[in-house]
Amino acid sequence: MQYKYSKIDLEQFAVLTDAPIDNNAEIKIRTDLEFAYSRENRLLANKITITATDNDQMLMKAVMSSYFEIAPDSIEEISEDDGRLVFDPMSLVQFASLNYGSLRGALYVKTANTPLKDLVIPPIYFHKIITSAFTIE
């Protein structure tokens, strides 16, 4: 599939604590993933939301969206006879991985001078999560 980045947007970012993180804290990282598609612009959007919590206290929230312009030839390749578009799981894994890598880098920079400077956002193996196609009616 041929595509190019159209836009990367860190839509939200907030560190919600001023206190240093206890070395024994059990910080939980939650990652939510969304896809959307605009036929008019041939744009596939991937939005990832990360929240970090310690017990029930939210420490950080970040939302990043990446927009990928899909080449017309590639749109033809994923078009069904009934007009539906079907993005296969491996393509979605690639788009999510690109966005997540960008988000991890942005968080590294954004948390550098905060109490979360040592927080490591773990890698995610999207091929274990994204197991079905994204179909556009």
Image (cartoon, rainbow, N blue to C red):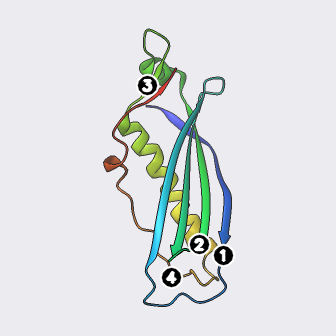
Q: Amino acid at mark 1?
A: Leu
Q: In the image, 103: left or right of 120?
A: right
Where is mark 2, residue-wise? 58
Q: Nearer the viewer, residue 8 or 28?
A: 28
Q: Tell me if mark 2 has few (under 14), some (14-19) or many (20+) residues whose alpha carbon lies within 10 angstroms of its own.
A: some
Mark positioned earlier in the residue sequence (1 or 3): 1
Where is mark 4, residue-wise? 118
Mark positioned earlier in the residue sequence (1 or 2): 1
Mark 1 in CB contact with mark 2 (< 8 angstroms): yes
Q: Which residue lies at the image location 58% right of the left edge and 89% below the top edge?
A: 20
Q: Secondary structure at mark 2?
A: strand
Mark 4 in CB contact with mark 3 (< 8 angstroms): no
Mark positioned earlier in the residue sequence (4 or 3): 3
Q: Amino acid at mark 4?
A: Asp
Q: Which mark is residue 16?
A: 1
Q: Nearer the viewer, residue 129 or 95?
A: 129
Query: In the image, which is nearer the foreground, mark 1 or mark 4?
Result: 1
On the image, the x and y values in percent for residue 55 come to 50, 77
Q: Amino acid at mark 3?
A: Val
Query: In the image, which is nearer the foreground, mark 3 or mark 2?
Result: 2
Q: Amino acid at mark 2?
A: Met
Where is mark 3, residue-wise? 86
Q: In the image, 1: left or right of 9?
A: left
Q: Which residue lies at the image location 43% right of the left edge and 22% below the top edge?
A: 78
Mark 3 in CB contact with mark 2 (< 8 angstroms): no
Up-down relation of residue 40 to residue 25 (above or below) = above
- Rounded to the nearest angstrom, the CA distance separating label 1 from label 4 is 15 Å
